[in-house]
Image (tube, helix red, strand yellow):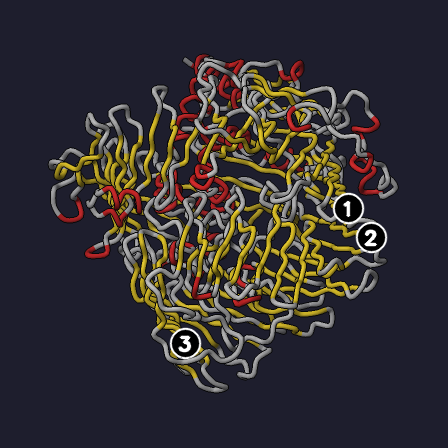
Amino acid sequence: MKNHISLFIFAIALLSGPVSANDLSMTAVKDTLASIPGEHNYIYVRTPLGEDEEKNYDEITFYDGLGRELDFAQSYGADRAGAIMAHHHLIEYDSLGRKEKQWLSTNTSFSYMSPEDLKGGVLWDYHDAGKRSYLQTNYESSPLNRITEQYGVGDAWGDHPARMEYLTNIPADSLRCSFYFIDDNDSLIRRGDYRSGELQVTKATDEDGKPTYTFVDKQGRTLLTRLGRGNQQADTYFVFDRFGRIRYVLPPMINDEISAGNLDLYAYQYLYDSFGRCISKKLPGCAAIGYVYDKADRVILSQNGNQSQKKEWTFTFYDNQGRLALTGLCSFNDPPSLDNSIVRAYRTTSEKDGVLHSGYEVEHFPYTLSSLLQVNYYDDYNFTTDTQLAFGLEKKGKVQYDSLYINHEASLISAQGRLTGTKIKVLDDERYLTSALYYDYKGRIIQGRSQNHLGGYDTDFYSYTYTGKLFARLHTYQIGNGKRHMEEYTYEYLADGELRDVYHRVDNAYRANHLLYYTYDNARRVFLKDVGGLGAYTMYTYDVRDQVIKTMCRFFLSEEISYNASPGIPCYNGNISSLAWRSEEDDTDGISKGYRFAYDSMNRMTDACYGEGENLTGNLNCYDEQVTSFDKNGNILGLCRNGAVGPASFGAIDSLNLSYQGNHLLNVTDHAKNNMYGSTTDFKDGIRSSAEYAYDLNGNLIQDLNKGISRIRYNCLNLPSAIEFTDGRTISYLYSADGTKLEVIHAMGDSITTTDYCGKAIYENGSLDKILLDGEGFVSFADDVSYSYHFFLKDYLGNVRVVYNEDREAEEVNHYYPFGGILASSTPSVQLYKYNGKELDRKGGLDWYDYGARMYDPVLGRWHVADPMSEKNYSITPYGYCLNNPVKHIDPDGKQVIPVPSPLPLPFYYPLTNTQSYRLPSDQQIMRHTSGKFAELGQIINHTPKMSYAFGTLLFYQAKNAISPEYEHQRKRDRRNKEGLDRNQANVAESIDTNVSGMMPNGDPAPKRDPKDKKRIIKVGKKVIIGLAIDRTYMELTNPDPTQDAYETHTNQVEGREEYSTDYVGDIYNWIKKLFE
């Protein structure tokens, strides 16, 4: 029996642009569908890639009679005979219908293939994996369907599964849990241990036998996470009050000692008001942060420890749609009560009117404002009369930008609901920088115009492909009345949307530089990468788990990364056992050099043993780096480092003992007697004192006597504004209120160097010095006319290993210690971007890397400012670098730790196409914010679907439990909003007519549909359905009720595109369920 179901299908309006695509006509589609046996259900999805009907991207998902997904096929091109090819992903189920085997993908024709044929293709394509070319999941024999074992891909993992055990607590050994509670006096009390059987315990053991325990009470609350084994166990406790609110998080260093001093140094502490809102949060070693809410439960005022000394508060005001309008600073002695007021900002008629000439008035906030930090403008462009910021047509003659001026030429298109401009303060200055953003009819930014801090203007122009990918970007720079410089990027893509080419042009050059070129293997992994178009290809080799195991650039550098293979100790849980490289630019005749690594039971790197030659057994210990001990929070207590002490001699250059007060560094003693040779980085023991380091109330380092730093001043963003040395030297920093670094002045005695940053343009003492190339190199300027290209060759961590010029000559070769120090075997430096591609400041002996949010000291292996996202991982010190595993993880911006990503094309610059959130964040937005962007990381993992680890689930689970209480309150409020409470005040409208309001039900501006746009074709069963936005079609089901899987599939697609709303889909799903009932 066939059921016809009526539903709404949303199609995305797509802009035309050049892109290669499959030559798959409707005739070919019908031939493909005709080959599918009649007993199989399927969903066929066609995504147009251009106005030409022949350019499309196609997908088919096959289901069995129970609605379970069997195979997912994605088209990617044609073979030499013209047949359409596809990636197939096979799934097998056990006798109870649970996913048992998820096979690696195989490439074959774009049609139905039997499971046996697909498995044969996988075994042929991945012969290195042996017979286990699939991820296998085993379950316990119970209705709970809980996972017990998960085997990774490859025969080598057949004896190394990740295991899950489900236990209950006992008052002994690894299953013991202390009983903490909050008494009637609001005090934290420990009363022995939980009795046997009161808690559920999940024991997760990774592939190397390293366990993690999670203790959960009967209310489903996580009370304890325990890492490690034996005497290396680290316990993190979560303490709740009687209302179920988290009050304390006790990191491992508490160790059941809950004195007031210990809590102040190590614990996370939270207080709430009578409405359940978090009004105070105290991070380890910092003063408390206070919060004040208005009647709409929004945080209006906040105050950190440094601000409390000055009676200063940070205010945040919203407009009548709940959009962030104003942030700034104000002062008063006692925090006001706003419980009976809804503080609201509203626009004035003039840009110079309103509070502090912001163009906004504020009601129900009867206090004087000191200064503005940022002002956001929406809906129109009345906020400025600066003609330099007005929409311009000067690039209309350029073909790729012609179609972008629909806003200017179509009077019906407006910026309603969009962020149209900002005014951002230059900190420690009285200036404000204004910018304006202009959109096309799909809500994409097509122009951006902004003032820079050097008295000039920057402009950006954007064009997009038919599918919405960035096709071209034009940027111009100018300071004052100086010469205007221009750079332009253009991008070309393959049929499946993968980036293939990037071209770069400077100042209307006749010929664009072929900046990047990618090719991909059959599994759609990067196979070749060429930077600079000079034939200096880097070739990537992968193992069966999609991990890079070898990179080779024939002219400069090759690198081998071992996981479960020699010469290091085999690791099956993703840790790197050894790393070897071979450079063509040093004097070792191509001899391999590298490290063998060792880890403790919490996967912290303890030893990096240097060696050379085959199996890294020659010239041992020349550049060893060893962490002799950690405390329970992961603070490094002992660090030893070898290096060059002469032209051809090596020895200990650092033997450090580090002492702490809480997580704050107190002093460092170096017992090494050798002096460093060459330009490497090592520790300088400048003074012997019990207090060589000091911190402010926000946990920022303010004194480092070993470097001769007498004082470090910080701005309101906890970014340095000045570093003062004891001998009178200074380093001064200038930031904007959004955290952008604008200027650095090095006053080193009689030498003063001023470096200005205008986007990617860097000026030295007023002259353009270089323009950075999206992380792949830079263009250096000798004067305002002549320039030259320099390209980066990076390793798997993003470290700049080789810098070469347009003649393919190496200008700089770098080698690094695991924690980021520079080996003495490196060549003299010609530029400042080194470890992880970050800028290294060596002037004055500073030797710090600038990651954006924080500065990193590679000599000590720690940050000097507390992690602004420390609540994403309570068990680790806020100052630890990359979970103390710097060869497996990176920190892109100083705020998040992620595993080393695959060498996908680096995300080039996209304009901010989504405006500021108009309401309090949703659950997913909160998760993304508080978990260090684990959500984005999950998307990366899912995009390479060969591997799925049980510990990925654990990582996300831990992140979920790290949500801060002030955001937990907003989570609860968001749920109430969804139930219909306080909708007007929170601006959460779930049932608005999209066409009338111009807003999607999820709060995002609704995309405008071009009547010329092509239709999206979706095939379900045997009927082609054509979706317009919004149009009614018919879905045909060839077997009863595969709607569950079909709904889940569609929901995933919807959630991946912010233009869609899952509210409509949920209504559809409920309607379908009711129909079948």
Quadrant in the picture for the C terminus:
top left
Q: Is residue 28 left or right of residue 311?
A: right
Which residue is labeled 3 in the image?
A: 653
Q: Quadrant of residue 728?
A: bottom right
**Residue 451 location (% of width, % of height):** 73, 42
Relative to the observer, which residue lies in front, 627 or 299? 299
Give the residue displayed 73% in from the left and 26% down from the top.
351
Give the residue displayed 67% in from the left and 53% down from the top.
757
Which residue is labeled 2 in the image?
A: 482
- The reply to whether discs 2 and 1 touch (Cβ–Cβ < 8 Å) is yes
Mark 3 or mark 2: whose residue is earlier in sequence:
2
Q: Residue furthest right?
A: 397
**Residue 891 location (% of width, % of height):** 48, 52
Q: Is residue 727 left or right of residue 487?
A: left
Q: Answer few, some or many: residues within 10 Å of disc 2's Cα (few below 14, many 20 plus, some between 14 and 19).
A: few
Distance of mark 2 from mark 1, alpha carbons? 8 Å
Give the residue displayed 71% in from the left and 63% down from the top.
533
- The reply to whether discs 3 and 2 touch (Cβ–Cβ < 8 Å) is no
Give the residue displayed 41% in from the left and 82% down from the top.
618
Q: What residue type is disc 3 on?
A: Ile
Q: Is residue 70 visible?
A: no
Which residue is labeled 1 in the image?
A: 456
Q: Is residue 272 left or right of residue 59?
A: left
Q: Is residue 515 above or below residue 23?
A: below
Mark 2 or mark 1: whose residue is earlier in sequence:
1
Relative to the observer, which residue lies in front, 389 or 374? 374
Q: Could you say whether the residue bearing mark 3 is in a helix, strand or loop?
A: strand
